[in-house]
Image (cartoon, helix red, strand yellow):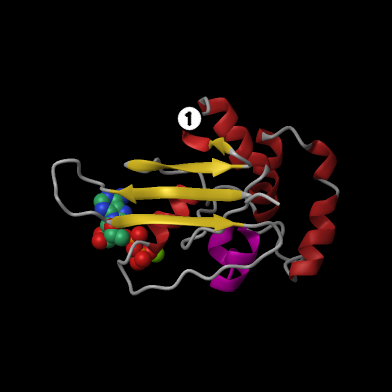
Amino acid sequence: MGALIEASRICKRYNQKSNNMELKETSLSIEKGKIYVIEGKSGAGKSTLLNILGGMEKPTSGKVYYKGKSFYDLKDSDQAAIRGEKYGFVFQSFQLIPELTVKENIELPLIFTNRQEKMDKIAELARHLGIENQLHKLPDFLSGGEQQRVA
Ligand SMILES: Nc1ncnc2c1ncn2[C@@H]1O[C@H](COP(=O)(O)OP(=O)(O)O)[C@@H](O)[C@H]1O
Ligand SMILES: [Mg+2]
């Protein structure tokens, strides 16, 4: 079976004028149902690699394929649909919206992707994650681990 996500010779240089390559040329393939670990010292480029694989940062060169399609060559709305419906991404700093309650934070991506039918699953999911009593709180009033589970 083909790879779900494939990176072909990607690299990243944040500043076009600098010689410093923040992510050196990397190729890898991600298969369905497997768990991967990315290891490297701080500043090695792990987050950069994840942001590129996660469809949020265009590589300076190289291609990322999602189910065989070159992700960054798709039009913006197609990229957004894959990010919204196919990818899950827990940010290092969670990126919860401070003005919205926990429940509203969880609902937000479902609104963007028009998936109201999933709303009734929130209570069940919250129970599974042990945050069922936090749903009406603002993220600032949660512990770090609880915020991570909301994300
Ligand atoms: N948005 C950015 N603009 C400029 N440089 C960045 C940016 N993000 C990360 N870097 C630099 O790229 C290198 C790799 O960063 P990062 O991918 O966050 O490393 P890691 O997650 O492995 O600790 C670091 O030297 C960092 O300073
Ligand atoms: Mg990092």
Is 72 located above or below residue 86 in the figure?
Answer: above
Residue 55 screen position, x and y as percent = 50, 43
Quarter holding the C terminus?
A: bottom right
Residue 19 left/right relative to 137:
left
Foreground residue among 10 and 55? 10
Query: Which structural element holds mark 1?
Result: helix
Q: How many marks?
A: 1
Is 52 located above or below residue 142 in the figure?
Answer: above
Magenta span includes 20: no
Report the residue at 70% width, 45% height from top. Answer: 107
Residue 9 left/right relative to 108:
left
Report the residue at 82% width, 44% height from top. Answer: 118
Quarter where residue 145 is shown:
bottom right
Quarter where residue 17 is shown:
top left
Span colored in magenta: 138-151
Report the residue at 40% width, 63% height from top. Answer: 46
Magenta span includes 143: yes
Q: Amino acid at mark 1?
A: Asp
**Residue on which the image places disc 1:** 73
Foreground residue among 21 and 138? 21
Main secondary structure of the magenta stretch: helix
- Which residue ends up furthest to the front in the rendered image? 1
Is 102 located above or below residue 77 in the figure?
Answer: below
Quarter where residue 115 is shown:
top right
Residue 134 screen position, x and y as percent = 70, 64
Quick check: which quadrant has ligand 1? bottom left
Q: Is mark 1 within 8 Å of ligand 1?
A: no
Residue 33 screen position, x and y as percent = 71, 62
Classify 10 Å Cα crowding around label 1: few (below 14), some (14-19), many (20 and above). few
Residue 28 screen position, x and y as percent = 49, 57
